[in-house]
């Protein structure tokens, strides 16, 4: 990650199309709201509203870093690190944390993960929850 040059994005449309398609396949519809849009923050299901809200997006030529919020019984922040090529996802790392963390830089994400990676209930990385 430190050797790549990343471009910070502010809209979900910056997610490469082929990655979005694979995320749709994994989740049966990876619907996500842009940062300024409403999403399903509560426990009541509203089909027309996205289940996720984009918090941070950065991409290089082969790595996508995405954080987003989900609501429900408790709000959570999801972290996706995706290594990709022009056709497919090559590798995927996920993490989930309780509460909403709104990073503004890659350094903040790295510090957040490093400070919680060995805590009980600090950061769950042994499960996939997209």
Image: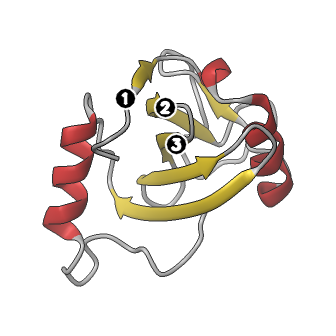
Q: Which residue is mark 1?
A: 5
Disc 1 element:
loop
Label 2 residue SS: loop
Q: Give the vertical position of 95 relative to 84 (above or below).
A: below
- Residue that mark 3 sits on: 63
Report the residue at 16% width, 52% height from top.
111
Q: Tell me whether circle 2 and circle 1 mark residues in contact (CB < 8 Å).
A: yes
Q: Relative to 25, does residue 108 appear above or below in the rendering?
A: above
Residue 130 can be seen in this image = no
- Say which quarter of the image contains residue 13: top right
Most distant residue in the front direction: 3
Rounded to the nearest angstrom, the CA distance separating label 3 from label 1 is: 10 Å
Q: Which mark is residue 60?
A: 2
First of labels 3, 1 by sequence position:
1
Q: Is residue 7 left or right of residue 87?
A: left
Residue 97, image x, y percentages: 35, 62
Q: Position of residue 94 (x, y in %)?
A: 50, 63
């Amino acid at each position: 990650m430190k050797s790549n040059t990343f471009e910070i994005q502010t809209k979900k449309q910056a997610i490469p199309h082929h990655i979005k398609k694979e995320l749709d396949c994994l989740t049966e519809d990876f619907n996500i709201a842009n940062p300024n849009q409403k999403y399903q923050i509560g426990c009541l299901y509203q089909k027309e509203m996205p289940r996720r809200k984009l918090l941070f997006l950065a991409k290089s030529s082969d790595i996508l870093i995405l954080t987003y919020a989900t609501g429900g019984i408790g709000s959570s922040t999801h972290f996706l690190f995706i290594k990709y090529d022009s056709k497919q996802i090559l590798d995927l790392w996920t993490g989930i944390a309780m509460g909403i963390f709104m990073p503004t830089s890659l350094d903040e994400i790295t510090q957040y993960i490093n400070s919680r990676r060995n805590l009980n209930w600090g950061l769950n990385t042994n499960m996939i929850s997209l």
